[in-house]
Image: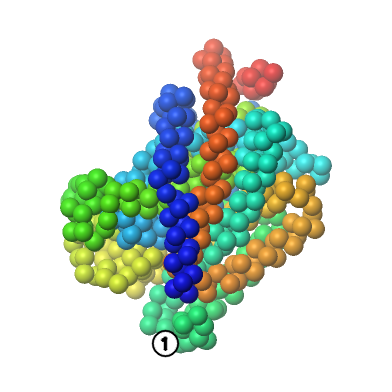
Amino acid sequence: METLNKVLGNIDDFVWGVPLIVAILAVGLLLTIRTKGLQFSKLGLGFKYAFSRDKAHQKEGDLSPFQALCTALSATIGTGNIVGVATAIAAGGPGALFWMWMAALVGTATKFSECMLAVKYRTKAEDGHIVGGPFYYIEKGMGPKWKWLAKLFAFFGLLVGLWGIGTFSQINGITSAVKNFFDPNTAHVAFHAFDMDYSWSTVITGLLLTLAVGLVIIGGVKRISAVAEKIVPFMAVLYIVISLIVLFTHITSIPAALSVIIRAAFNPKAVTGGAVGSIVVAMQKGIARGIFSNEAGIGSAPIAAAAARTEEPVHQGLISMLGTFIDTIIICTMTGVTIVIMQLSNASAFDGLEGVQITTKAFQLGLPIPEQWSAFILMICLVFFAFTTILGWNYYSERCLDYLSHNNVKAIKIFRFLYILCVFIGPYMTVSAVWTIADIVNGLMAIPNLIALVALNGVVVAEVNAYFKKLNTTPSIESPSIVESIDE
């Protein structure tokens, strides 16, 4: 297992090297400049559209715009918000959180652009359902000669669903959290394998989650979106509330924590005493975990956005970009600042901890309730977060297979059972291997999408200019005639 971890680590370092980090930030910065900082100036409009009951834009599609956002959030708000932030800080120091912010600020423009393009270039399958995503805006936007790039994206997307964000890391995060709560010392061993003892809590939780996932995903996208629409708002609000309790009860410590985060981003050794290496390490871990969490530039969210009942690409792009803001700027920040505050006041309490254990300890120290209750609440949040991510990524990876197999129904049914199988074996993967595999396939998936976003940035600008020109010259921005005139 040690040899495997070393090999995976070398591959991860190569994929997530300086070139890809620079590429992700550069594409986000390019789109920020080209759209004139739309993610800042139009953020309020995006929230207005997301919660509007207006039907003007809700026409052809499988999901409402809000359902499309919730489906995307179900995939993005997951273990990355709880475990991924802790892992980034542990490996890259507090400064990793700063680089997560930077990636998210420019990544919001990336998320807007890719989701807008997904609606513009989407198509209708033979059975009538709407399909879209990077594979279609690569093929239709860049031209048929780039279809190989579209297939490459779809192939990597399939791997991300099966081996990365969708299965291993999520179920592993859930079972680890449940075990840490019910059997932290592994007193009740079910079996021994891979030089490790596996608790009955891990086995039982894995079986129950596998069953629950199977019951939902076999029902297809509409059942997934229906579950996401109910669970996502609840789980996000619950986690935000408990995080705010910690932050408000330690409000005087927030300035010091923010100072440490910013200083560590540019001089890690000065803050960590040499425990963490260079700025590049902080950037690598922060950006990699940030992308894992909010998926801006990965090309996943556009697959859900394409299914929205709307005829206006920019309208859905404004709604979809909220996913990055909610995921990283709000939820990941709360997690990260909480961890840093608690580490500053009691660093020794975190010695030897990894993954979800770090976040759990931070909330146990920070919440004004018994530690056992704090651990239980965080465990519930993690279970909801990871469960919905498993569902969301099943939808994404199915759409990738849909593209590769030309809507082969038999292939998709077989894939669903393979996906359930990966959920079943996920609890028995090591923490290190799980996150490394997720990083590798994430990076590979991002490359074709980034190429497409650069190639089609002119289309993004043209759509944005046309849309807001119409809004500025029409009395009612919600009038159906506007959508029709833009579409024409």
Which of the pair 23/87 is nearer the observer? 23
Residue 163: where, in percent of width, then height? 57, 61
The residue at the point 78 percent across, 47 percent down is 406
* Position of residue 142 in the picture relative to residue 326 (left or right): right
* Position of residue 17 in the picture relative to residue 159 (left or right): left
Q: Quadrant of the C terminus?
A: top right
**Residue at the top extreme, as displayed:** 473
Residue 76 seen in render: no
Instruction: Return the residue at label 1.
Output: 187
Looking at numbered disc 1 in the image, what kind of residue is underneath it? Ala
Residue 298: where, in percent of width, then height? 53, 45
* Position of residue 324 in the picture relative to residue 208 (left or right): left
* Position of residue 248 in the picture relative to residue 381 (left or right): left
Q: Identify the element where label 1 is drawn.
A: loop
Residue 118: where, in percent of width, then height? 62, 36
Q: Quadrant of residue 239?
A: bottom left
The residue at the point 77 percent across, 41 percent down is 125
**Residue at the right extreme, as displayed:** 126
Q: Quadrant of residue 274?
A: bottom left
Residue 86: where, in percent of width, then height? 35, 60
Residue 401 seen in render: yes
Q: How many marks?
A: 1
Which colour assignment does the render follow? rainbow
Q: Is residue 359 above or below residue 22?
A: below
Which of the pair 47/87 is nearer the observer? 87
The residue at the point 45 percent across, 29 percent down is 30
Label 1 CA crowd tier, 10 Å (few <14, some 14–19, many 20+):
few
The residue at the point 75 percent across, 60 percent down is 413
Which of the pair 373/418 is nearer the observer? 418
